[in-house]
Amino acid sequence: MGNRYGVAADGTIRGVRTLLGMTAARGTNEYEVWARAVEGDAGAFGELFDEHRDRVFGHALRALASRHDAEDATAIVFLELWRHRRRVRVVNGSVIGWLLVTTNNVCRNQARSNRRYRLALSRLSPERSHPDPSDDLGTELDRARSAPGVREVFAQLNARDQDILTLCVLEELTTAEAALALRIPIGTVKSRLYRAKNRMAELMLLNAPDVR
């Protein structure tokens, strides 16, 4: 597919091409920039930050539904990229796969911290909230995930399911690219993706409102 997901300046989701497609279209190769960054070149790391910041922020915003939390998550992701730069795998000329999987991990940790904080507050001032109705999974998963109900359903999936849906459905990586990013066989990607889609659909049905 061509144009799809991204985040505008005001935080709304808008269409952009996948980063791998953008990199290929410009004829650039992140291997060269990344090699310099690995050796401690701050300028090269800054180039990668500028290249991928909006995509990472948009992904975190969809998961956390808070610009402030998404900004914090983005900062942590790039800090982790720098700290672990000698172990990061570049897939098809880009580090985007590693960044997105790391974003999932950071957002899960942040969501757990937020839940603990809300629980502590609820003991002082109880407050109940109800998730919005979810949309169907399908090709509109990314758009639907911006709704609180679907975001909560996505959060119920295990880490493997979240990562495989992020790479193959939300970011439209091929099964081969996802396999490289996750360091698993292509067949495992296909089976995990099948199970993750089914599990997501089941959870959406369970969380859907009764319509009589």
Image (spheres, rainbow, N blue to C red):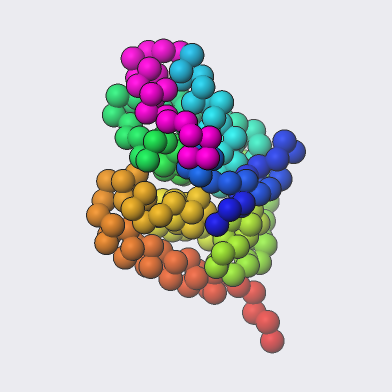
Magenta stretch: dominant secondary structure: helix
Q: Is residue 119 visible?
A: no
Q: Is 208 covered by the magenta stretch? A: no
- Quadrant of the rendering where the N terminus is positioned: bottom right
- Spot the residue most to the bottom: 212
Residue ID at (60%, 41%)? 58
- Quadrant of the rendering where the C terminus is positioned: bottom right
Total number of numbered labels? Answer: 0
**In this picture, residue 72 sits left or right of residue 161:** right
**In this picture, residue 205 sits left or right of residue 109:** right
Q: Is residue 195 visible?
A: yes
Residue 108 position, x and y percent, is 46, 44
Task: Pick whichever, 90 or 126, lies toward us.
Answer: 90
In this rendering, the answer to whether 155 lies above or below 210 is above
Residue ID at (60%, 31%)? 71
Residue 97 position, x and y percent, is 41, 42
Residue ID at (37%, 67%)? 195
**In this picture, residue 131 sits left or right of residue 39:** right
Region of the chain picked out in magenta, as a range: 24-42
Residue 20 position, x and y percent, is 48, 42
Residue 104 position, x and y percent, is 46, 44
**In this picture, residue 98 sits left or right of residue 122:** left
Q: Is 30 covered by the magenta stretch? A: yes
- Residue 191: name its quadrant: bottom left
Residue ID at (64%, 74%)? 209
- Spot the residue most to the right: 10
In this rendering, the answer to whether 131 lies above or below 96 is below
